[in-house]
Image (cartoon, rainbow, N blue to C red):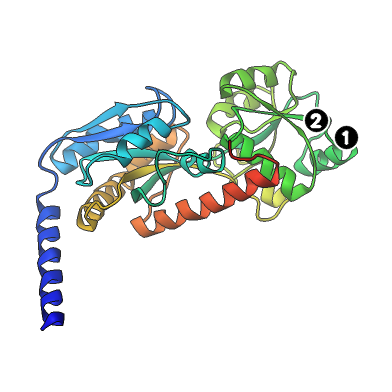
Amino acid sequence: MKALLLWSLAISLAGAECAQAQSYPSRPIRWVVAASPGGGGDIVARLLAPELGQLLGQQVVVDNRPGASAMIGAAIVAKAPADGYTWLFGTGQHTINPGLRKEMQYDIVKDFAPVTPLVFTRYFLTAHPAVPAKSVKELIALAKTRPGQLNLASGGTGSTGFLSGALLQVMAEIKMIHVPYKAVGPALTDLLGGHVDLMFPSITSGIPFYKEGKLRGLGVTSPRRHPSIPDIPTIAEAALPGYEMQSWFGILVPAGTPRGIVDRINAVVVNLVNIPTTRAALIAQGAEPKTDTPDGFARLIKDELARNVKLLRAVGVEAQ
């Protein structure tokens, strides 16, 4: 009798969840972007929001909540009702922050239900022309003859540019001086001026200076050569097999959101991102469109979280 009651309850709950998913959405959706307008992937969210609104039959409203390395916006969504009406425009920074801070207002694994990644951003190792290295192998050899002398700029400790350099040093067994900046822009300016030697800008921000001959491109962080700069090899093929670094942007909702609603959002978003015109628009922004299932996205987040914490500790960065 007890087993029959439990079975009946499970069937009832499943039916209720299915009905809830079928009627979703019935009001506007709030899409929290943990960055300022125009930055941190905001352009991607604003590009997709109107189309998503049309497909879902309800307006998708972008709500910018920048600050604290994307943690302010994430904390807002983590505490929101688990009903599918508050989304987070998540970023790979969320898998880095736990390795930098002992106290967090949320747990990126426990407090969110991943829906799907949207796009990936790749980076490439650039050098000021004065640096006497024209390939990744030559740079590694140079760094070994000058331990602790070459300096590597980034947009701050814990940024993807910083992690790209950290992974390079760990895998190549070399040591460089990290020069952190408050943002990528000032770091890139100093690289162009020859005040620092190396940097890992995003491919989008670094390409113009490479094509103008103001910076030397040594290697990209993707597993395959980037179509925008096919003449630059990957770091993996050039010197360090297995090297890869990326940053992603995707959609997460509060933990406990009914799976039917999660699957509904996933289906609509995946279909939109894979429309040729949408893909072309995203690629034009320098992004690499790539979606996945909720379970696949969850694995990506867990894998990157473990890797990033390990990498931070390997280069001496402890949580504060």
Q: Residue at x 17, y 38 (%)?
A: 54
Please state the horizontal and vertical placement of residue 82, each as a whole percent of the image.
23, 46
Tag of residue 146: 1
**Image check: 258 left or right of 94?**
left
Report the amino acid beneath label 2.
Leu
Is the C-beta separation of discs 2 and 1 under 8 Å?
Answer: yes
In this view, the residue farthest toward the right is 145
In this view, the residue farthest toward the bottom is 1
Report the amino acid beneath label 1.
Arg
SS at badge 1: loop
Please state the horizontal and vertical placement of residue 288, each as a whole percent of the image.
46, 42
Q: Quick check: can you spot residue 230? A: yes
Which residue is identified by label 2? 150
Q: Residue at x 68, y 41 (%)?
A: 166
Mark 2 Cα shell of 10 Å, populated few (<14), some (14-19), many (≥20): some
Depth check: give the residue in front, 297 or 1.
Answer: 1
* CA separation in Å, label 2 and label 1: 7 Å
Location of the C terminus by quadrant is top right
Please state the horizontal and vertical placement of residue 134, each as a whole percent of the image.
79, 35
**Image check: 285 left or right of 307?**
left
Tag of residue 33: none
Rendered view: 150 above or below 236 = above
Task: Tell me the quarter of the picture where residue 162 sits.
Answer: top right
Task: Tell me the quarter of the picture where residue 25 sits.
Answer: top left
Please state the horizontal and vertical placement of residue 172, each as a whole percent of the image.
77, 48
Rendered view: 312 above or below 36 = below
